[in-house]
């Protein structure tokens, strides 16, 4: 079978660039860089990821909204750190038709400044709280670094949840819920990740603190898939989002946000794929099973009937199944569906029909076996379970193997992946460690409360307060 020109383990970045187009996810030839065209197969995949997000939002009582794309400059300017953080990435609108606008508008880079003036109108009393809303929309950021499909783009397919609460503690509860959402969501996509509490100097503009969701790509660079922010009352004060308490006084809300994007697709492609193409976890695969009739002259009818029976059985239990009856060789069909990462292929020829058997081929392992046609529904579901387990464990093993806890920068020098190193808590030291390791500061582990014991900051020699993580990042 033909394989990709670039091999995943030889040149991951080139392999990635090749595969996103070969597998029909997107088309990069659109005349604005970083604004790629979603092709039907890629868009379907994104839709299945979004579906999982909608489900999580429904389960946790978030309501879906849809805010305008344009934000007036005056709204955008209310929170100073926020403008400072986003100012250089914004697309401005200065004209409407032939008229120059009196006040400039901008394309949302994220929707805090669109939503919060409205929140201040919506929230009156503590009975209006918590307010939990979300939207999945496109946002715009002017990236100056080299763009990469799904990973670094200028038009972003963005999920953003925004919440308002009576106080800090209640907002902290929301952050705990967000972390649970992330765990459930990424497990379904077989993507093990780490939470990092971003350093003070690199948190979201306007946030009190930021927790990132990072995965490790096969190139040993991390990719941030999402972030969860505690705003405290940093935005509610300038935007006057307050409520009347039981005692009749006014209090400012505490707010959180949770954001994710199509970078999830980047991780699905990069982490699970191989030299034959994509390998999709069943939960999000646009097509979960493809049936390929092996036709011989004179036996067309019985083979197609058997295919149809299996199809009906699988459809009944909600499986996304497709019969590929195109007039090309079975070999070409195998190649196509392997490229697209369909988790399971069923082959069926006249001899199989006689024996009431079909051949199953797993995309993740290439494993092949004959099973009874009657049991198709039951067996397919079992195998989906095995595929999930295998994809998750493979990725987890790679992640675990490449997190290195060391005690000095010397020890870290030739290591690849994620480095955890004792750190005094001083920004200057962290930035210097970045230089020496030629990586970026990811942040502190949050799921790991152990303080480094008897350790010293490898730069200043003072006693180390915490572990700090470093990695090369996308
Ligand atoms: Zn130090």
Image: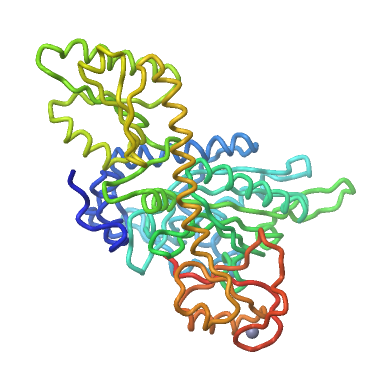
Residue 84 visible in the snapshot = no
Residue 305 visible in the snapshot = yes
| Corner quadrant of residue 44 | top left
Give whichever of 198, 247 is nearer the camera: 198
Q: Is residue 206 above or below residue 120?
A: below
Q: Percent x, y for residue 77?
A: 56, 65
| Corner quadrant of residue 467 | bottom right
Q: Percent x, y for residue 128?
A: 73, 41
Q: Residue at x 44, y 62 (%)?
A: 104
Give whichever of 55, 460 is nearer the camera: 460
Q: Residue at x 52, y 46 (%)?
A: 186
Colouring of the image: rainbow
User: Which residue reaches farthest bottom?
Assistant: 460
Q: Residue at x 32, y 13 (%)?
A: 309
Q: Percent x, y for residue 181?
A: 60, 44
Where ligand 1 lies, by quadrant? bottom right
Relative side of 385 to 126, left or right = left
- Total marks drawn? 0
Tell me the quadrant of the picture where the N terminus can be found. top left
User: Which residue reaches farthest left?
Assistant: 297
Give whichever of 383, 338 is nearer the camera: 383
């Amino acid at each position: 079978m033909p394989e990709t020109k670039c091999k995943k383990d030889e040149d991951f970045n080139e392999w990635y660039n090749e595969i996103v187009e070969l597998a029909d996810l997107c088309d990069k030839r659109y005349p604005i860089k970083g604004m790629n065209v979603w092709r039907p197969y890629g868009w379907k995949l994104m839709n299945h990821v979004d579906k999982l997000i909608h489900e999580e939002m429904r389960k946790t009582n978030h309501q879906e909204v849809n805010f305008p794309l344009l934000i007036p400059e005056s709204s955008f300017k209310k929170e100073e750190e926020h403008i400072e953080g986003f100012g250089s990435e914004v697309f401005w609108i200065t004209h409407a038709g032939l008229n120059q606008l009196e006040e400039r508008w901008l394309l949302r880079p994220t929707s805090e400044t669109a939503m919060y003036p409205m929140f201040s109108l919506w929230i009156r009393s503590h009975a209006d709280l918590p307010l939990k809303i979300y939207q999945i929309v496109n946002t715009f950021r002017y990236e100056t670094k080299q763009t990469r499909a799904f990973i670094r783009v200028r038009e972003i397919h963005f999920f953003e949840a925004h919440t308002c609460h009576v106080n800090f503690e209640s907002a902290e509860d929301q952050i705990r819920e967000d972390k649970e959402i992330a765990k459930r969501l990424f497990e379904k996509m077989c993507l093990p990740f780490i939470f990092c509490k971003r350093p003070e100097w690199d948190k979201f503009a306007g946030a009190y603190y930021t927790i990132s969701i990072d995965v490790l790509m096969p190139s040993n660079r991390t990719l941030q898939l999402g972030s969860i922010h505690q705003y405290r009352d940093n935005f509610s004060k300038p935007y006057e989002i307050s409520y009347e308490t039981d005692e009749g006084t006014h209090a400012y809300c505490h707010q959180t946000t949770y954001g994710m994007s199509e970078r999830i697709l980047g991780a699905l492609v990069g982490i699970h794929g191989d030299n034959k193409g994509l390998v999709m976890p069943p939960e999000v695969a646009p097509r979960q099973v493809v049936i390929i009739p092996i036709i011989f002259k004179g036996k067309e009818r019985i083979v197609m009937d058997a295919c149809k029976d299996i199809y009906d059985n699988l459809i009944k239990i909600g499986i996304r199944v497709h019969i590929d009856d195109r007039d090309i060789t079975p070999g070409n069909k195998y190649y196509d569906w392997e490229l697209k990462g369909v988790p399971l292929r069923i082959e069926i020829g006249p001899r199989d029909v006689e024996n009431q058997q079909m051949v199953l081929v797993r995309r993740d392992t290439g494993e092949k076996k004959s099973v009874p046609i009657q049991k198709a529904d039951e067996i397919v579901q079992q195998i989906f379970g095995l595929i999930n387990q295998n994809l998750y464990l493979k990725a987890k093993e790679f992640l675990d193997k490449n997190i290195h806890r060391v005690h000095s920068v010397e020890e870290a020098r030739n290591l690849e992946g994620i480095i955890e190193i004792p750190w005094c808590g001083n920004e200057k030291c962290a930035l210097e460690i970045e230089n020496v390791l030629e990586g970026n500061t990811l942040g502190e582990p949050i799921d790991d409360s152990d303080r480094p014991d008897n350790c010293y900051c490898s730069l200043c020699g003072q006693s180390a307060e915490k572990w700090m993580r470093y990695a090369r990042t996308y």
